[in-house]
Image (tube, rainbow, N blue to C red):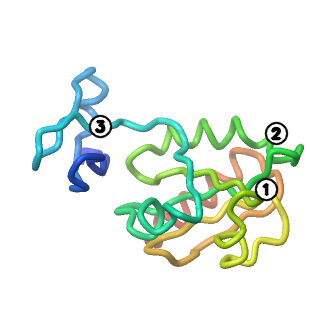
Amino acid sequence: MIETLTIRCSTCGAFNRVPREKLDQGLEPICGRCKTPLPVRNSPILVTDANFSVEVEHSPVPVLLDMWAPWCAPCRIIAPVIDDLAAELAGRIRVGKLNVDENPITAERFHVRGIPALLLIKAGREIDRITGVQPKSEITRRLERALAEV
């Protein structure tokens, strides 16, 4: 079975399926609709109240949303794990980071009372939540379980 990534074109908005093996060969994907080079993200995207709908609710794949704040020491501890997961699970999930201090509307919408909080969101609906610092193995286990159910 060929593993594919779903990449949204930043120019025309089209969703493109790209075989992971092509990326591993060093080939650059282009949009099937407008022929613009596609951004291959191996790092978390910045999510705000303003772009939440586009980046999270309309994502073709589930989104792991890291709710954090710059003053939060546990958030800084878990940040490298979030970066690793973004690279390892690219195409299967999108990983985003939302600063709760700068984006209170989304934080309130999901009733985030403690950070770091990792929300797994599919089609705008929360399907799992991990609060506090957890080992990478536990986060991965929960993501894999949730993805198997999606």
Up the image or down, 134 lies above or below 77; here it is below
Q: Which residue is mark 3?
A: 20
- Percent across and percent down for residue 9 are 26, 47
Judged from the image, the secondary structure of the residue bearing numbered disc 1 is loop
Mark 2 to mark 3: distance in Å?
Answer: 30 Å
Up the image or down, 74 lies above or below 47; here it is above
Mark 2 or mark 3, which has the lower sequence index? 3
Closer to the eye: label 1 or 3: 1
Up the image or down, 126 lies above or below 84; here it is below
Judged from the image, the secondary structure of the residue bearing numbered disc 3 is helix
Q: Which is nearer the eye, 52 or 32?
A: 52
Q: Are marks 2 and 3 in contact (CB under 8 Å)?
A: no
Up the image or down, 72 lies above or below 60; here it is above
Identify the amino acid type marked 2: Ile
Q: Which residue is mark 2?
A: 77
Mark 1 to mark 2: distance in Å?
Answer: 10 Å
Identify the amino acid type marked 1: Pro
Residue occupying the point 28% across, 29% down: 23
Residue occupying the point 56% across, 55% down: 47
- Percent across and percent down for residue 40 are 36, 36
Judged from the image, the secondary structure of the residue bearing numbered disc 2 is helix
Q: Which residue is mark 1?
A: 116
- Percent across and percent down for residue 123 are 43, 74
Closer to the eye: label 2 or 3: 2
